[in-house]
Amino acid sequence: MRKGIRETKQDRVFNGVNLVFMLFIFIVFAWPIWFVIVASFSDPNAVTSGRVWLWPVSFHTGGYVMTLENTEIWRGYLNSILYTLLGTAVNMVLTIITAYPLSRMDFMPRKILTVAFVITMYFGGGMVPMFLQVKDLGLTNTIWAMIVPGAISIYNVLLLRSFFLYGVPKSLEEAAMLDGASLLQMLLKIYLPLVKPTLAVLVLYYAVGHWNDYFSALLYINDRGLYPLQYILREILISSKIDQSVNGLDAASIMKKLKDAGTMKYAIIIISTLPLMIVYPFIQKYFVKGIMLGAVKG
Amino acid sequence: MKQKRPFWKRLGLDLRKNYILYIMILPAVIYYILFAYVPMAGIQLAFKEYSIKRGIWGSPWVGWEHFERFFSAYNFTSLLTNTLVLAVYSIILNLLTPIVFAIMLNYVRSVRWKKTLQMVTYLPYFISTVVLVGMLNLFLGENGAVNGILGLFGAEPVGFLTSPGLFKHVYAWSGAWQSLGFNSIIYIAALSGVDYQVHEAAIMDGASKWRRIWHIDLVEIRSTIMVLLVMSLGGILGVAFEKVLLMQNQLNFSASDVISTYVYRVGILQQDYGYSTAVGLFNSVISLILVLISNVLAKKLAGYSLW
């Protein structure tokens, strides 16, 4: 690890092993992602015949054209954006207004409510009673089915609560109290500004969860117009349901369509993961922080 | 100072003083009643024959009938075995791979290379389950890139996605791929907290890197490992259901049908609500028992408790 000390033979063996191991890790992690990018820009025939490895072969964007021409993907994309924005907003508001009372020592039902909420982390009704309840409430086939059943994560509430409890200096609170600040003003003016990094982490977790959610749609949504992107992706990537209608097309267009379907899967992976990949470099530090927050809490 | 007033009087005072807190907590209370406690009451379906007309509360009781049916079902053993195999396999992998990675990364000298490795290993965590399984289909299919590589060495194409025998490996290793970066963060942090003087002293005594890993690094992160191991035991029956469902196909079905996918199929698709609730309840009760046991173990072995 440090210079100046002569390395033994054993250590040189170790360094060699370590280098090989890390190169292996790098390839195993970076190459599949790189390959998806490269394949999405390659000629479909070159991809299926295994001629694409590291660079696009005969640059071709038919997969993207086909993806962008697919109206279901567009609608799914817009739906997912809506669910992510609205869902995350609901999550954040509820998490904040739940964590705050639970962090106030003089709030009488604090203990009993905390226990009642935490129990649900370890035991629940299960898939079927939950499904029936969502149905009974009339949420099935509405956008609320994508947002309301997962509106609060008790884990995140506890996380934020401990930051309210230990991350805000008591002297600040007392000073505000003397100035006649109300409980609500205290939350908005003192607590929230002080826990901004934690809030950023929570936004990140909630948003990624909404963007990647397909299961809520599988359970609660039957209306094709309401499907989120992940559900449409599931049909295309896994059930291989690609619009193969060839009505009114001439032979050349049919051939082109069948061919482009080959790289469409790669293109659609890129397009669907793009929003996260774009923000990833900016959120990476928060992401690491978030895990450490969880560890500190535990 | 602490003169006890009657309960109702204290509550009245608190309501007046903290009324804003009561308003704030109200949505959460409603939420947990509607989406946690009402479904919990719905568990009674496990002991009832559900009729749409009479609803959950009005349906007739049938006792343990659904459980008996499940325990004597032809696929009971295979459901349980598949669930356990997938879960135990991934628990072990998800525990070991991040430790190995974090320790080896700790001995990488170039800061840039280290950062790059961390960045590429975090990346898959953001990929959705649907896209991950989609990538598995593309890479591991008959004409996929992996079989292309194997072909270069003259190997026959392997049916990674269709072979029941390979299902657990594909499931567990792809899971390890996705969460390696995420899971290693905590170990990387623990290792960077090790006082370098300990290492220096060991080097002076002529300890090789292998020995330093064994006698310093592993000892330092021992308690972290224990806590994470014990905590993961609670999840033994909690297979990543969404992923299994997506990876399931007719050819690998004998190895990929787990309790939760069975609940989904029987409950949601075939609408056999009573029976599927019973199967789900069996799953959650065992999970709960495992969580309780692992918490006791954690307390004993690592001095750590969930509560």
Image (spheres, rainbow, N blue to C red):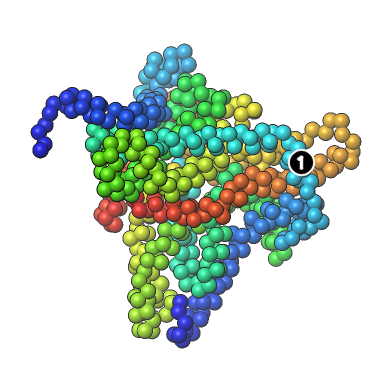
Q: Residue at x 39, y 52 (%)?
A: A293
Q: Residue at x 51, y 81 (%)?
A: A12
Q: Residue furthest top?
A: B53
Write down the chain letter for disc 1. A
Residue A101 pos. (x, y %): 31, 36
Can you see residue B45? yes
What residue is pinned by disc 1? A66
Q: Is residue B185 left or right of residue B290?
A: right
Q: Is residue B235 above or below residue B13?
A: below
Residue A198 pos. (x, y %): 42, 48
* Residue closer to the observer: B28 or A38: B28
Q: Residue at x 53, y 64 (%)?
A: B115
Q: Residue at x 43, y 35 (%)?
A: A93
Residue B140 pos. (x, y %): 65, 52
Can you see residue B66? no
**Quadrant of residue A2 in the image?**
bottom left
Q: Amino acid at mark 1?
A: Met
* Residue closer to the observer: A294 or A91: A91
Q: Is residue A128 left or right of residue B169?
A: left
